[in-house]
Image: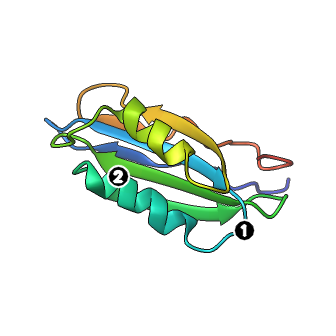
Amino acid sequence: MPFYPFEVGRVFLIPGRRLGGFRIVAGREHGVLRKALDVCSKYNAYLISLHFTLNPKGEKVFTLIYDLTESTAPIKEIAEEIEKIESISEVTLIEQQAEGFIADTASPHNYSGWS
């Protein structure tokens, strides 16, 4: 019987904190990640986790998880600003499932042909 790895994904528990994140798909231009991180930093969002990969189309895919407890803007407003960055084609929100708990629900679990 062949063995297939089981992807648990990104899960964070930080009691008493407001968590959120983004799955961002972008073209091949340089500096896209820095621009997205700069937007989040501007609103006092603190980066907890960053995952990077390329999809089969060669696009950059970033998954960013943040502590938004001290953020000066709602997560949706931050996402809207990130979407305006040149070469970003998709921004998917990852919202906390309970206070202080977030699981990456935006990244695909079937890696054949994902975007």
Residue 77, x across and y down, in percent:
39, 33
32 sits to left or right of 55: left
Image point 79% across, 46% down: which residue?
114
Residue 41, x across and y down, in percent:
29, 57
Of 85 and 14, which appears nearest the observer? 85
Q: Secondary structure at mark 1?
A: loop
Image point 24% across, 28% down: which residue?
99
Which numbered tag is attached to residue 68? none
Task: Please tell me how crowded label 1 is: few (under 14), some (14-19), or many (20+) other residues with Cα within 10 Å.
Answer: few
Image point 77% across, 57% down: which residue?
3
Residue 69, x across and y down, in percent:
18, 40
Q: How many marks?
A: 2
Image point 77% across, 49% down: which residue?
111
Residue 68 is at least partly visible in this image: yes
Residue 46 is at least partly visible in this image: no
Furthest-bottom residue in this view: 30
Say if 35 sits above or below 20 in the image: below
101 sits to left or right of 29: left
Which numbered tag is attached to residue 28? 1
Q: In terms of sequence position, does the residue under pointer 2 or pointer 1 come before the other? A: 1
Name the image colouring: rainbow
Marks 2/1: CA distance?
A: 21 Å
Q: Secondary structure at mark 2?
A: helix
Instruction: Please give the residue where the numbered disc 2 appears in the rendered image.
Output: 40
Residue 38, x across and y down, in percent:
37, 61
The residue type indicated by label 2 comes to Cys
Of 50 and 75, which appears nearest the observer? 75
Of 26 and 106, which appears nearest the observer? 26
Say if 98 sits above or below 35 in the image: above
The residue type indicated by label 1 comes to Arg
